[in-house]
Amino acid sequence: MVSNSSGSSSHLGDPNSSRTSFDDRNKRRSHDAATTHAETQSMLHSSNFELEEEEDGDVEAHSLRHKRTFSGRVLSPSTYSAAWMTGKEMMRSSSFMPKGTGRFNSSRAAVIGICVFLGFVIIVSVFPSSSYKSTKSDYDIDSTELTGDNTFATVPKAIQDKLSLPALSEQNRRDRTMNDARCRKEFPLLYPQLDELMRYWQTRGGISKEMIDENEKGAAPHWGHARLIINRGKVYIRAFKEGTETRNSALVHLVQQAVESWPGGGVAKDDTLPTVDLILSPGDKDIFPNQASWTVTKSIKDHRHTGKWLIPDFGFVGWPEAGIASFEEFLDLATAQEVQYPWYRKHTRAFWRGFANVYAVRRDLIERTDTKKHPERERWADVHETTFHPDGKSDWYPLVTLPEHCQHKYLIHVEGNSYSGRSRYLLSCHSVTIAHPLEWTQHFHPALNNFTDSPNQNYVQLPGPFFEGLEEAVHELRVSDGMAESEPERKVTNDGKAVPPIKILKYNGAQKIANNALRTLRHRYLTPAATMCYTRAALRHYAESLNVTSWSNVGPIVKAGQGILPDTSKGRIPSGVKGDIEVGVWRLLGAPNWPPQ
């Protein structure tokens, strides 16, 4: 947590006055903060490793050539090479060798050269560079490498290309109790975004109690919100308003799951459960007055969203109002669909069902796939509007369940008011997801890879704007899958000039992209294990971003009173009840708005 000796109640604090306390804490936290970059760097040198999938699906890295150790630390090939060449060149240098060189002097030179080499290794092993270092990992990565040209990821293309871990076994996919070291090993791409967010707040004085108070008072009423206190391994409700549907309750349940599954009960020496005060909402935008909040999505381009903390979407727990059970249940149903519809049996037209509403990007999709005005599009497009609340109009198409989407090879993903929670379902099918350039991000988006020259590409991104290039993309995908296709209609400008054809694919065909999505997303980054690992990591990073002095110098504490009195029951809360209430007890009372009015 952040400690600000000034005790200022300013929302952002004075970066200069808090710098010393941050630096002191960073010395203690350096190993933990570095592990993210260090683990992720392992992907950069994967050419020096063989990855063996064991019976349980885990991956163990085995040393090969170019790998040397010193005092238990493994040196990267570049570090080893630099040290070795330094000694080697000194041995060869005529200026280094004394006159009258004979066998004795040659031997002496060789010994000195080797000493230089060993000295270099010692220096590298003992003294940290400007890069983050970690004694927990064999690798390091410079923080300047964490900005790539892929707007969906916080890691560069070079690392994405090396992300070739095999699918997790079913047992490991469902393991919610992985410790932090194991989580970082299995899901390295989830951590850089949290490191960057923690640094963002630490350079601004940290998150204060006053900021969270302001968000509770000024929260948009439509979406609802929950203020939670996590203390001594338990989750308490300080404030709760359900808002739209049961989304807010789902997020509370997700946090409770993460805490209950904390390895070692949250008291292990190397993985202690932090004490935090946080506020969250299932809304997608314009929810809280300031950024010290947890939301399910945030804008990539809007600087007002930079400091928001991402929580996994409520749909991971369930969305009953839409007829959707838990995401884990969906994965089971999707797997059953894949048995009935293996790749060769899947439908081959680009598929979408949804409510276009007034959203420009969705209207663009409808116009580009309109088969009434352009019957020839029926050949490649199966795009129609549907709704959960039909109003008697005859042009609504029947609903298609999310697991049934997996019957199709090519699935279209489109944002709406902001993000669309449908993406994780589409990306979990053994299919190719086609998306326009996205403007909103979710917690798992760093695992998305749209680089066309990457062997691990797991979805297709159109060049834009909106769905420009959709027909060309579907054409290329179908051709790559062995279908005989006529060329897409050539486009011309207003003055009659031919528009150069758009090239969407490069090295990967449709089935390979679908295989990658199955391996990297459904069987790794969208698993219950990954969701719990991320949520716990986010809580740790958030705790390190709090300005604890704004909570009377001791950090967040639980308000006394327990939230119950004798004769309290479901639907009946007597007057005079006070204090924070445990989530479990709150559920027994029917998950009411809190505190009671």
Image (cartoon, rainbow, N blue to C red):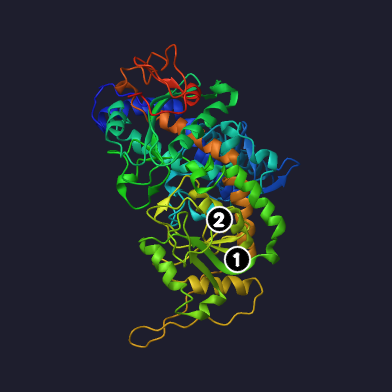
Identified by mark 2, the residue type is Leu
- Residue 525 visible (yes or no): yes
Quadrant assignment for the N terminus: top left
Residue at 44 percent of width and 11 percent of height: 566
Label 2 packing within 10 angstroms: few (<14), some (14-19), many (20+): many
Q: Is residue 66 visible?
A: no
Q: Quadrant of residue 344?
A: bottom right
Q: Nearer the viewer, residue 182 or 405?
A: 405
Outermost residue toward the top in this view: 566
Could you say where residue 94 lies in the image, as x and y percent from the top left? 55, 51
Looking at numbered disc 1 in the image, what kind of residue is underneath it? Answer: Asn
Does residue 214 appear left or right of residue 393 in this picture? left
Q: Nearer the viewer, residue 511 or 34?
A: 511
SS label for mark 1: loop
Residue that lies at the very extreme toward the front in this rendered image: 392
Q: Position of residue 43 (x, y in %)?
A: 58, 48
Residue farthest toward the right in the current orientation of the protein:
55
Q: Which residue is mark 1?
A: 508
411 or 550, which lies in front? 411
Q: Earlier in the sequence, mark 2 or mark 1?
A: 2
Q: Dividing the image into 4 quarters, which one contains the C terminus?
A: top left
User: Can you tell which quarter of the image residue 295 is in?
Assistant: top left
Mark seen at residue 426: 2
The residue that appears at 63% across and 53% down in the rendered structure is 518
